[in-house]
Each structure stands twice: as C-alpha cells, then as structure tokens.
Amino acid sequence: MKRLAHRFRTLPIRARLAMLVAAAVAFAVAAVSVTCWFIVQGKLYDQVNSDLRKAAAQAVAQSERRGPQNEIVSAFSNCTTTPQTAPFGSFRDAYSEAITEAGTVCVLENSIGRIRITEGDKKIAANTDSSSAVVRNGTDSQGTPVRVLTVPLGLSVTEKTGAVSGTAFVVAMSLKGTQNTLNDLALILLIVSGIGVLGAGAAGLAVARAGLRPVDKLTEAVEHVARTEDLDIRIPVEEDSEDEIARLSRSFNSMTASLASSRELQQQLIADAGHELRTPLTSLRTNIELLTRSEEIGRPIPAEDRKALLASVKAQMTELASLIGDLQELSRSEAQRGERAQVISFEDTVESALRRARLRGPELTITAALEPWYTRAEPAALERAVVNILDNAVKFSPESGTIEVRLTDGVLTVRDHGPGIPADELPHVFDRFWRSPSARALPGSGLGLSIVARTIQQSGGEVSLTRAEGGGTLATVRLPGAPTAPPETAQ
C-alpha cells in the first residue's frame, strides 16, 4: 500500500487528476448500478410474489367452496407425487402442491414439477391462521431455483384412521427467467459502468490538461528565468479572471517585476558606489605614492606639505568609512529594519542628534523647541536620519549662522539660512549619490538624504525639502504617533 501511495505521488498532476476523477466516477457509477440492480430485483420479485398470492388466493377460495371435510379427505387420500386432478384447480407454468403437516405431498394437475418441501412448510401446514403464509426461495426436484409461497388451509381428517392433520397449499414459480433478466441487467450495467469510467478518465485528463495549461506556462516561465536570468518575462493574465491560477500568475509577474527592479537598483547602486569610491581611492593612492616616493628617493617632503598630505589621507579615509557605512545602511532589508522597530521618544532622538550636530558646527547657533512625541521606528536608524538632516543644515549654513529646529505634533522642521536649493534640483535631492553641482567640492557621498527618505518612509512618515522664505532650506519630517507613550512603554 505504501509503495502504491508513493508511486501515485510520483505521477504527474495530470495523471493523478485523471485517476482521481475516474475513481470518483467509478464509485458513483458502481453505487448507482448496484442500487439499480437491487431495485429491479425487488420489482421482479414483487411481481412473482403477486402472481403467487393470486394463485394461492384462488386455491383457498376453491377449498372453501368445496364444503365438507370429507371431500378434502378424499382428495388427499387419492394424491400421489405425480400431477393429477385436484380439488384446488390447476395453475399453468407453475409448481402446485398440497401438503400435510406429516409431510404428505400431493402434486396437483398441470404442475410443471415437484417442489422440495422443507420443515418450515410442514410447520406452516400445522398452522390454522391463513395470514401466516410465507414466501421463500427454494428449488424443485431438479435443482432449478424457484420462488415458493406456502399458505395454510386448515385441518383435514384421514378417513382410514380418523387422524386430524393440518394442510397447506404450496405454489411456486421458476426464477430462471428472473435471474436471466438480472444477469443481463448486471452485464449491461457493468459494460455501461466501464465505458463511463473510461470516459471519465479521458474527460478528467482533458480537463486536467486544460486547467493546468496556465501552470505549464508558469513552469516554462520559471525554467526560462532559471536558465537565462531574464526577469522581463511576463505571463499573460485576463484582467477579469480571479481564479487561483490567475492569482498565481499575477503573483509571479509581481515577483519578477520586483526582482527586476531590485536587480536594477542593485546594479545602479554598485555602479554609483564604484564611481563614488573611485575619487577618494584615487586621491588616497596619489597621496600615498607621494609619501612613498619621498621615502624612496630620500627627499623628505616639507613638514607643512607632509602634514597636509596626512590630513588629506585622514579625510579620505573618513569619507570612505562614511560611504561604506551608508552603503551598509542601504543594503539592509526592510524585514531587518522591521524586527528592530519599537516605540521611541522622537523628542529624545532629536535631542541626541542635536548634541552630535553642535559638535560638528560649534561656530553655529542651533536653537531647538521640542515637544513630546512617541512613534514606532528603529532608534538607531531614525537618529541617523535626523543627524543627516542636521549635517546638511550645518554644511550649508554660513559662518556664525543659525539653525532653527522645531518639533510640534510629530512634525520636525529644520531650517537653515544657507544658499538654499535651486528649484530645478529639488526633485533629485533624495536620489542615491545625487549631489548638487555647487556641493561637489564639499565632503559627502550623496547618500545621506537617500537614507533619510528610506528611513522615514519605512517608519510610516513623510519627508520633504523646500526653499524657505527669506532664503535657506526647510526640511520637514512627519511621523505618525502620539504625544504620550503607550501604557506598556510608559511602564
């Protein structure tokens, strides 16, 4: 059984569906056929029983019209085991006998044979109640199957001995024709059932092929992607179709589109990262080659120039470390970010970022007006995003300038008084590695605002940069939340 089950599971889906459909139809057809056969058998037997009861009723009526018991005694005294004229009349195409409780048998005239009497028939003969008639299956003397009805007729007296004995009338009809009809019906039902099962199997296979055709297309598409890594392939789906195959096809199309977009972004990120890394690496190599060449030729570089070279190397190393950190931040998946998200105080996060910003711009005046606000986000990522916004404000603020920071109802605004961002550059400020032409000479990788946008969006908020009235830039961050901490956080 286990081997059969294993073989069934290894069959193609089409074959399994066809076999399951054929099995279901076979079960249904078998149930209907068996039910039909038994119904027909019951109807045929009811007809035979009806004929037998008519014959028995006629015999009982004739017996009652004969009158005195001595006529019945005379009739039984002359009975033999061969057909003869009897007081109960004749019944063509039937077996007819009269018996006593002692087992004496009188085969009546025109009986087509003799019935094998049972002990049950003798007991019925001893019974005076005519309602105790019994119908049974039996055989004649030749072994032919017959349907037998035994009806008690009352008591009779034997003239020679004066003994009283019960009598019964036994009538039977051959079941050969009925059984032949049932056998023919069984054969017909078997043939029809076999044709039905084969037809069901063929229909099931056709339906399976038609139903699994979209799955075949999906399989071919998956194999094509695995073979060629071509993510531009799409499976055609009817717009109004909502079945499981259509949903699977749409999901596959969405998956390949997402993978293609992800690969595009990955390739773009690698290309942009390579481009951005080229500049600091080239500068580092040049500076290190100068220092190395100075050592090789024995001509020391002047102290001031050497100090400037080392400062440049240190700055380039810092820029490389910052760029690598930004790339690591961008490479983290949303699932990793979501696992670390928690309810935090936005006010505390901004205060921590302000402390870092004041260290980077000690000559600037940074004012802050913060109100409590609690939101759900990853603490480190949100603080990094706020620090990046403040770093931009510090970078583009004039000497001894002012930066105004305000947090009200979950809206953080950072306003500087620098040159501002040209209107044609505002749509690109959150793109990866994008840097304003006027800021190319300043340190940075062009990933800071891209990280800000991603972090705020993943926290369910919005971020924007606009030109401030009177000059400068206004950064606005909106995050969902509440001014009070949830009960579980407060505890």
Image: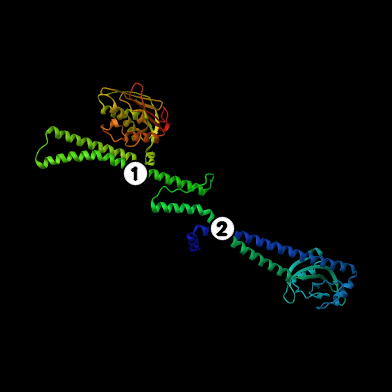
Residue in view at x 49 percent, y 53 percent? 215
Specify the label residue 384 is tagged with: none
**In this view of the protein, can residue 71 be seen by the observer?**
yes
Specify the label residue 267 is tagged with: 1
Does residue 62 sit above or below 224 in this rendering? Answer: below
Which element carries disc 1, helix, strand or loop? helix
Side of 248 relative to 432 (left or right): right
The residue that label 2 is drawn on is 204
Side of 184 relative to 260 (left or right): right
Residue in view at x 71 percent, y 63 percent? 40
Residue in view at x 39 percent, y 52 percent? 228
The quadrant holding residue 136 is: bottom right
Q: Position of residue 151 (x, y in %)?
A: 80, 67
**In this view of the protein, can residue 22 be seen by the observer?**
no
Which element carries disc 2, helix, strand or loop? helix
Side of 197 relative to 51 (left or right): left
Q: Position of residue 427 (x, y in %)?
A: 37, 32
Question: Which of 317/157 is in front?
Answer: 317
Q: Marks 1 and 2, Cα distance to the nearest angstrom?
A: 48 Å
Question: Which of 446/98 is in front?
Answer: 446
Q: Callout 1: few (<14), some (14-19), or many (20+) C-alpha neighbours within 10 Å?
A: few
